[in-house]
Amino acid sequence: MFLACVFVSILLALMPQAHSHMLMVEPPARNAMSRLGYSNVPPHPYDDYLVCIQTPDARCPPCGDKPDTEKPRPHEAGGKWATGTIVRTYTLGQTIQVQVNVTNSHGGKLRFKLCTKGRLNRPVKQSCFDEYPLTIGGRNSKVVQLTTPYGSSEVLNLSVKLPFGITCKHCVLQMTNTAKEFEPSAVMFRNCADIAIKGTAKTSMAGGPPLEQPPSAFDLHTRSGFGSGYEEQKQYRFYD
């Protein structure tokens, strides 16, 4: 296991990071916000390359950081890219639209989970996400298999069902891809997005409506712009 992890570590280090990997753009993940017009978040040089190798002694953090990253980790509450900005507000039990841009596939399965205990300065634990694995609409399944060949790109537009009866001022939506290419090592790509779920029939989009023209796989591949060309999103935290 140790040698396998070392091999994967070297392989990941040698991969050109400009050859993108994976980014959740709807709802905008913390690491994607600067690219999508949120001016209160600094530019992210590796926004689609949040990758971690999980071992029995080093569990991958929930939002894409590496286990040995100094706290506060940059993609967790209190970190550089975790500003607490609610990017979308939904209604309880709603089926929401999620878009994931994969521009260098390593295969494997994609999962979405919800933590209802988001805080501005208190990181949430993986056990919180594990309470609410979400169902992918139209599949009656909690996983999506990446089917494009290794190294290829695809854009996944998915319907994800929020749990009925759950409301929150600050929830965190987690995306996880465990790469099949590197098995038996557990190589994970993770993103987190800050959302709210209201208990009324009225739904508002706290961070602006979903993008009519999300960045293409080519845009992500070239890392051009970091938000240029997209209308600046309105930003505020959700309160009653």
Image: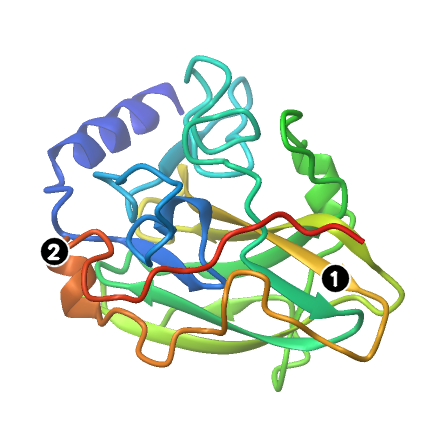
Q: Closer to the camera, 151 or 51?
A: 51
Residue 133 place in picture, x, y as percent: 70, 57
Q: Label 1 neighbourhood size at 10 Å, few (<14), some (14-19), many (20+)? A: many
Most extreme residue toward the bottom is 138
User: In this rendering, is residue 2 above or below 238?
Assistant: above
In the picture, the disc for residue 224 is 2
- Image spot of residue 134 (x, y percent): 68, 64
The figure's colour scheme reads rainbow
Which of 125/226 is in front? 226
As rendered, which of 135 and 124 lies closer to the eye? 124
In the image, residue 178 sits, relative to residue 9, either above or below, namely below
Q: Is mark 2 on a helix, strand or loop?
A: loop
**Residue at figure coordinates x 26%, y 28% from the top left:** 9
Q: Horizontally, is 68 left or right of 139 in the view?
A: left
Q: Which of marks 2 and 1 is nearer the N terminus?
A: 1
Badges 2 and 1: C-beta atoms under 8 Å apart? no
The answer to whether any part of residue 16 appears in the image is: yes
Q: In this view, does 221 lie above or below 169?
A: below
Q: Give the labeled residue for mark 1.
A: 197
Q: Which amino acid does label 1 sit on?
A: Ile
Q: Is mark 1 on a helix, strand or loop?
A: strand
Residue density around tag 2, few if under 14, some if 14–19, many if 20 or more, within 10 Å? few
Residue occupying image coordinates x 55% and y 23%: 56
Q: What percent of the width, then of the height, locates residue 71?
A: 49, 14
Q: In this view, does 163 lie above or below 48?
A: below
Which quadrant holds residue 51?
Answer: top left
Residue 234 is labelled as: none
Picture coordinates of residue 49, whole percent (x, y): 28, 43
Say which quarter of the image contains residue 149: bottom left
3D distance between C-alphas at marks 2 and 1: 33 Å
The N terminus lies in which quarter of the figure?
top left
Tell me which amino acid carries mark 2: Ser
